[in-house]
Amino acid sequence: EELIAELGSVFLSDYYELINEDLIYSSSAYLKSWLSVIKKDFNILISSCSKSEEAINYYIKEIR
């Protein structure tokens, strides 16, 4: 859930063009902490990206 939320935050920031150096630094540092888990099972990354995209698409279409 944490990985999904972080990826969603990055995706949503990109959608609203809010990407800046501070966001890139903090998000990349946090995502780097997930590398050992992702290296063991790459499907975790694929699944998390998919779920993040689904949540962001819902937000953009239904809530916004």
Image (cartoon, rainbow, N blue to C red):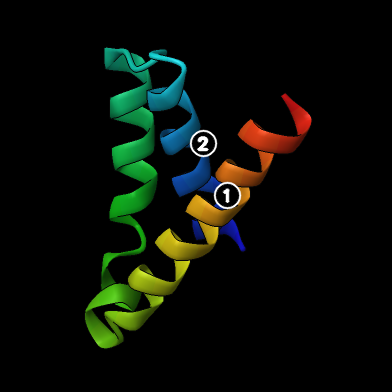
**Residue shown at the point (29%, 27%) measured from the top left:** 25
| Quarter of the image that includes the N terminus | bottom right
Task: Give x and y (percent) for residue 48.
Answer: 46, 65
Task: Give x and y (percent) for residue 46.
Answer: 34, 71
Q: Residues within 10 Å of mark 1 (few under 14, many from 20)?
A: some
The reply to whether the C-beta atoms of the residues labelled 1 and 2 are less than 8 Å apart is yes
In which quarter of the view is residue 43 placed?
Answer: bottom left
**The label number, if any, that marks residue 9 in the structure image:** 2
Q: Is residue 51 above or below residue 10?
A: below
**Pointer 1 residue:** 5
Q: What type is the residue that disc 1 sits on?
A: Ala
Q: Is residue 7 above or below residue 13?
A: below
Q: Secondary structure at mark 2?
A: helix
Q: What type is the residue that disc 2 sits on?
A: Ser
**The label number, if any, that marks residue 60 in the structure image:** none
Most distant residue in the bottom direction: 40
**Residue shown at the point (57%, 43%) measured from the top left:** 57
**Residue shown at the point (37%, 30%) measured from the top left:** 26
Q: Residues within 10 Å of mark 2 (few under 14, many from 20)?
A: some
Q: Is residue 43 above or below residue 5?
A: below
Task: Give x and y (percent) for residue 34.
Answer: 36, 63
Task: Give x and y (percent) for residue 12.
Answer: 49, 31
